[in-house]
Structure formats: C-alpha cells, structure tokens
Amino acid sequence: MKGCVKRDADMEAVRRACSGAFSPHAGIAHVNVDICRDDLLVEIEGIVPPERFPRA
C-alpha cells in the first residue's frame, strides 16, 4: 500500500490515520510527493489479494 502525501507537514497525521484504519499487518509506504490533482492532499493506493475476499 502506498500513501502519497502532498505536504510533508501532514505526514505524521496521515501515518496515525492509516495505522488506525488499516491492519497492523498491512505494509504501508508513506511518501511525500506532488500529487497531480490540486484538490487532493493525500492519495492512498492499495492492492488486496483475492484470497482476502469471502466467496459468495
């Protein structure tokens, strides 16, 4: 999982929010980057393996 943070000053707040929202087993890389959309301060991308979804 990747957490892209536009402003470095927001990095710790994003880390805290992610640690409360996602499993402690999730591998999260937080990076300070210029996000291409002006209206976003944080963008989170992730992949969930198919075996994590319950079968119908």
Image (cartoon, rainbow, N blue to C red):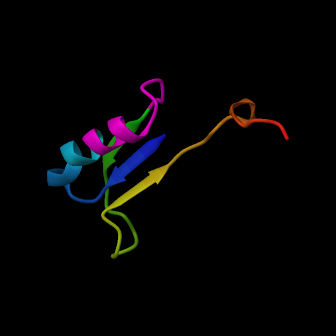
Q: What residue occupies the far front of the structure in this picture?
A: 56
Residue 8, image x, y percentages? 19, 52
Q: Quadrant of the C terminus?
A: top right
Determine the residue positioned at 28% across, 40% down. Answer: 15
Residue 50, image x, y percentages? 74, 36
Residue 22, image x, y percentages? 44, 37
Q: Nearer the viewer, residue 17 or 43?
A: 17
Q: What residue occupies the far bottom of the structure in this picture?
A: 38
Report the side of 48 relative to 35 (left or right).
right
Determine the residue positioned at 28% across, 47% down. Answer: 14
Residue 52, image x, y percentages? 68, 32
Q: What residue occupies the far top of the structure in this picture?
A: 25
Q: What residue occupies the far left of the structure in this picture?
A: 9
The quarter holding residue 36 reads: bottom left
Determine the residue positioned at 63% across, 39% down. Answer: 48
Q: Nearer the viewer, residue 21 or 10?
A: 21
Report the side of 31 relative to 45 (left or right).
left
Is residue 23 found inside the magenta-colored segment of the image?
yes
- The answer to whether residue 18 is above or below residue 7 is above
Determine the residue positioned at 44% across, 44% down. Answer: 2
Count numbered badges in the picture. Answer: 0
Report the side of 5 relative to 21 (left or right).
left
Q: Nearer the viewer, residue 27 or 31?
A: 27
Is residue 24 found inside the magenta-colored segment of the image?
yes
- The answer to whether residue 43 is above or below residue 36 is above
Read off the magenta span: 16-27
